[in-house]
Image (cartoon, coloured by chain):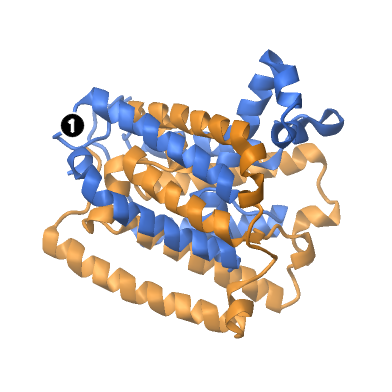
Chain colours: A blue, B orange
Amino acid sequence: MSNEKPKPYWSPYMAGLGLGLVLLLAFVIMGQGLGSSGAFARLEYTLLHTVVPEHIESNPYMAHYFEDGANPLSNYLVFLVVGVLAGGFISGITANRFKKSVDKGPRISVKARFFLAFFGGSLMGFGARLARGCTSGQALSGGATLALGSWAFMMMFFAGGFLGAYFLRRQWL
Amino acid sequence: MNFPIESTGAFSFSTGMLMTFLIGVGFGFFLEKGGFSSARKLTAQFYLRDFAVLKVMFTAVVVAGIGFWGLVHLGMLDLEFTFINLTYIWPQIVGGLILGIGFIVGGYCPGTACVAATTGKLDALWCIAGIFFGIFVFSELQPALKAFQNSGEMGEVFVWQWLGVSPGIVLLGAVLMAIGAFSLGTIVENKKGSVVQPD
């Protein structure tokens, strides 16, 4: 950590250009786009499988990940998200942006912010599994390949955000 | 060249995963550079105060989309070995809506929550815990929700097929939409002086 002032974020066009080129490279090198919620699920199923193996095996949706002795962590998305953690950290720390903090508007308590973060996260975990991907796997990667369902997902994602914004304004503004 | 490189068998498993890790580093790096490690910056999109979400995401989609379809057009990228999201229209519509609502409530999406956590945001850790919980709930209920999750199945279908035009026309439309939306966004941002920077 440094006492120097945090550097401003990049122009969104430069960040978007970089992100777009990384996404293109992912397709060119590995034949897959970017994603993240899949890695969460794989880690979670692996942990649950060590604690309550019979329960996981009895649910075909989760058992599928362990078929023929497969290791769910030995997977593209898992290595990708480990990289995301490293890349985010490198960018943040070198721009003096690493700071233990709670990101919220001035009108809400830390406790309420934590509760809403958890609740919103739960909705996203549920929604991402239902839709077979989240903002990165569907909207970003599916969007670039022009997959029809991913574009429907993207429009609905923005619709959901704008619909909820009025009710959540105390948290952010 | 034949792309994707992975499909040519040029990589061992560990080389492939090293490549994947490095791609992930780039992904996380540019997300953080764009300010996606801040919930206030991300959510400011939905109060029309900071258009970074739209600008970063749409720039990336257009850049990658032009590269992707350009390579397909030149016969260099084989779609057969490339992962394309299958369309299940109903769960994607409902799931996208739930994710959008979850995003404005939680402040991050799954990928940006990771990046935010690496820059010290404690709320992002709660968001990540929530994502695990939501995945758990869905996975437990999936046998009952399976019929809906598989509804509206259309297979591998592209926006341009659905519209009956070429990929280039759709990409051109996306570029024009992006330029229009970015210009309007910038006018609003300048008027309000509301672009979020780190503090």
Q: Nearer the viewer, residue B48 or B144?
A: B144
Q: Is residue B44 above or below residue B127?
A: below
User: Which quadrant is home to the N terminus of chain B?
Assistant: bottom right
Q: Residue A49, percent across and down? A: 70, 21
* Snapshot quadrant of residue B15: top right
**Left or right relative to B25: residue B79:** right
**Along the viewing direction, whichever of A116 and A9 lies nearer the viewer:** A116
- Residue that label 1 marks: A108
Q: Is residue B119 visible?
A: no
* Mark 1 secondary-structure assignment: loop
Which residue is found at the position 57% from the left and 36% from the top?
B138
Visible in this render: residue A97?
A: yes
Looking at this view, is B149 or B106 the one in front?
B149
User: In the image, B145: left or right of A8?
Assistant: right
Q: Give A28 or B138, whichever is nearer the viewer.
A: B138
Q: Answer with the quarter of the image where residue A105 lies.
A: top left
| Residue depicted at x 82% and y 33% | A67
Image quadrant where one finds the C terminus of chain B: top left
Callout 1 amino acid? Ile
* Percent x, y of residue A26: 64, 54
Q: Position of residue A97 (x, y in %)?
A: 32, 35
Residue sitting at 61 percent across and 31 percent down? B140
